[in-house]
Amino acid sequence: MPGARVALVHDWLTGMRGGERCLEVLCELFPGAPLFTLLHVPGSVSPVIENRRIATSFVQRLPGATTRYRHYLPLFPLAIGRFDLSSYDLVVSMSHCVAKGARAAAGALHLCYCFSPMRYVWDLYDDYFARGRGLTMRLAMPPLAAALRRWDRRTTGVSHFVAISKHIADRIRRAYDRPSDVMYPPVDVQRFEIADGGGDYYLVVGALVPYKRVDLAVAAATRLGRRLLVVGTGPEEARLRALAGPTVSFLGWRSDAEVAGLYARCRALLFPAVEDFGIVPLEAAAAGRPTIALAAGGALETMVALGASDAAPTAVFFSEQSADALARAILTFEGAADQFDPKALRARAEAFDRPVFKQRLSDYIRHRWTERREGRRC
């Protein structure tokens, strides 16, 4: 897009999670574009992201911001709105919180790749704030959440939304009354290899936070006496350890290479959450391993159910978010484990591979840019 002045916007840079892996692709497409973000912890993201001009907000300078930035949530709308993007023709934001509220210049094209409307104040409010919190939090959050929802609805400067799944497209429609295109995030298939034979354990990978419902996996594995390895850290860890029986082990944070090895040798991944998209089942599939998943959210769009007639299965689904339902699904899987072909699982993941996403994202941005330019000439 010759002559286009491009700015990138992301909520915060504190680690390489799914959103940052998408941002990395965007940075490769626009290597000279500056990146605007609320907060940057140097060294926390890949060199592709680090090696550019990164502009941060005043949140960067607040006490303890690098570790406790979420405590400053009420200030995020103000912080994102103070970025000066008036000199840019094209703004591409990747947003799960407030990045979509960045103010592009009048007449500029603002494309938002939306991981989700702000989960904390929309669908997952109870998971984040309503349970197990102190009295002050329970009293303060309802009016604050209402104010954030009003701000979120008012920030109408996005030209086009792109949702990471149909599940999120529906959430965008309900929250903002806006349509959106759907483009699935990438899985870096080359990070994973198929091992010779599976191991004797089930696996959970993810942050130990309430909405992930790791407690269901812990309870089901304990009840059945199955070995379960839990990879991840978070505020739920102490409670989960108290629930766990002797067959459950907590491994904490592990490197990408270690996680890839754990995927390759597990019996199956346990995935009991309602996820916006759910990259973890595709990572397991890239390593040739199936998933036992709740039949909800993004997993329904990426996984093929056992018994489906149109393609090789990649998952056993369970319909109720309970330990009993997950335990039954584990037993169903164990009775049909030979129906899961590692090569077919990897082929499924390859449909979401990183180069596929990069090409689709490039084509989409170019299409919307051309559409805008031709509309102006008309």
Image (cartoon, grey):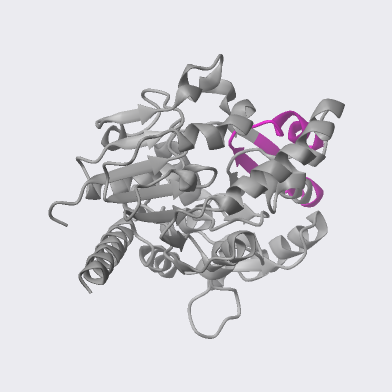
User: For this rendering, which residue is in front, 233 or 81?
Assistant: 81
Residue 212 locus on image (x, y percent) = 67, 47
Q: Is residue 1 magenta?
A: no
Q: With 377 as the anchor, is 97 left or right in this view?
A: right
The residue located at (40%, 27%) in the rendering is 56
User: For this rendering, which residue is in front, 148 or 208?
Assistant: 148
Q: Is residue 241 magenta?
A: yes
For residue 206, what is the image quadrant? Answer: top right
Pick out the residue farthest to the left. Answer: 2
Residue range highlighted in magenta: 221-249
Pick out the residue farthest to the top. Answer: 63
Q: Can see residue 291?
A: yes
For the C terminus, the quadrant is bottom left
Residue 273 locus on image (x, y percent) = 66, 54
For the N terminus, the quadrant is bottom left
Q: Count the marks: how many?
A: 0
The residue located at (55%, 37%) in the rendering is 77
Position above or below: 208 against 270: above
Position above or below: 230 against 133: below
